[in-house]
Image (cartoon, helix red, strand yellow):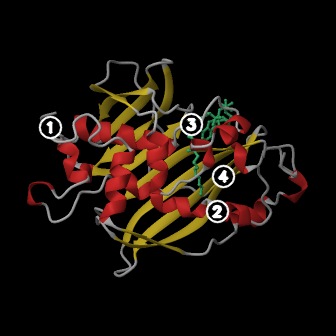
Amino acid sequence: MADKSEFDPQLIISHKFPEITYSYTERDTALYALGVGACADDAVNDKELKYVYHHDGQQSIQVLPTFTALFSLDFTSQLAQLPGFQYDPHLLLHGQQYVEIYKPLPSSGCILNKATVAGLHDKVKAAVLEIEVVSYEKDTGEMLCMNRMTVFLRGAGGFSKSSQPYSYTRYLANRTLEYKIPKTQPFSVYEQRTQPSQALLYRLSGDYNPLHSDPAVAEIAGFSRPILHGLCTLGFAVRAIIKCVCRGEPNMIKGISGRFLLHVYPGETLITEMWLEGSRVLYQVKVKERNRAVLSGFVNLDRLSSSL
Ligand SMILES: CCCCCCC[C@@H](O)CC(=O)SCCNC(=O)CCNC(=O)[C@H](O)C(C)(C)COP(=O)(O)OP(=O)(O)OC[C@H]1O[C@@H](n2cnc3c(N)ncnc32)[C@H](O)[C@@H]1OP(=O)(O)O
């Protein structure tokens, strides 16, 4: 259990993380694509070959928009250094991910990541921490994308010094982040089975949290076996949207938001339901075997064909 007397919200929200450089090659972008299930249905004729191979004379492989979320992961280790902050890393769960993409990602590159604390909330049973990472192309200084990652830290709540639970968010102006999953029939539904080895493959993209690979660690965290990375489930969902709504064009995606509602076990089947709302796709992912919603959110597109 975290020591609440050490918890200092003001110190936490004013903390400046060191800048972190992240370099990647086409091998990393291809490995990532395989980790989120690309080409799993049909390795040769699949429309997703472009994510792993220079298909049809392509100069470079294409990058899935959810690859951007990896840029925020290097700051996981920095959480332990946050002054005035106490939590048990075994009890950390990924709560939400919000991504804005400003230009198509190169298939290899060197990125400069700058992170700040964008939110902190006392939920009594948990502390919710928001980290914002803005990513720049190292050579040109051009802004590529922004990630807001929310972590749900079980057992770390109850740190408020007054009777009002502490809550701070640095608001994002001119964005509509609220969404409501419709009760109507979805525009499209896509079913994908994850592999029992899915988390072991996905972790090679850089999230080595043992919650996803070590049965003993998973048990301490309250699960019967290792669970899937939240960002892996998000990758499956966004691939489904690219296939069913964007006609295979990943660069149509300009923004992604997802809230992790429940854990997923590797090997379970994901059903992604999609609804169109202007240039936004609302989506919900359910686990077929347990008939439970595990993820919901929206994807913003730069255009949506009127012929859809
Ligand atoms: C730099 C950072 C790096 C981070 C790297 C990430 C590392 C990864 O390796 C870790 C992972 O991938 S973990 C796997 C993916 N995540 C999950 O499986 C979590 C799934 N969600 C849950 O289990 C529950 O929703 C649960 C447990 C999250 C919440 O359920 P409950 O305890 O039932 O909560 P509830 O009573 O419904 O709500 C309490 C208050 O908390 C808010 N809340 C709920 N779910 C949230 C979520 N997912 N994200 C953020 N906030 C959330 C509620 O709104 C509520 O607040 P309020 O009372 O103010 O309304």
Instruction: For ligand 1, tell me if the residue under mark 3 lies within 8 Å.
Output: yes
Disc 2 target residue: 77
- Say which of 95 and 207 sits in front: 207
User: Which amino acid does the dot numbered 4 rest on?
Assistant: Leu
Q: Label 2: how many residues lie within 10 Å, few (<14), some (14-19) or many (20+)?
A: few
Q: Secondary structure at mark 2?
A: helix
* Residue hosting label 4: 129
In x, y percent, where is residue 160?
83, 49
Q: Residues within 10 Å of mark 1 (few under 14, many from 20)?
A: few
The verdict on label 2 being within 8 Å of ligand 1 is: no
Which of the two labelled residues, at mark 4 and mark 2, occupies the earlier sequence position? 2
In the image, is 148 to the left or to the right of 64?
right
Which is more N-terminal, label 3 or label 2?
Answer: 2
Tag 4 secondary structure: strand
Q: Which mark is residue 306?
A: 1
Mark whose residue sits in front, 4 or 3: 3
Residue 299, position in %: x, y? 36, 43
State the CA–CA distance, disc 4 to disc 3.
Answer: 21 Å
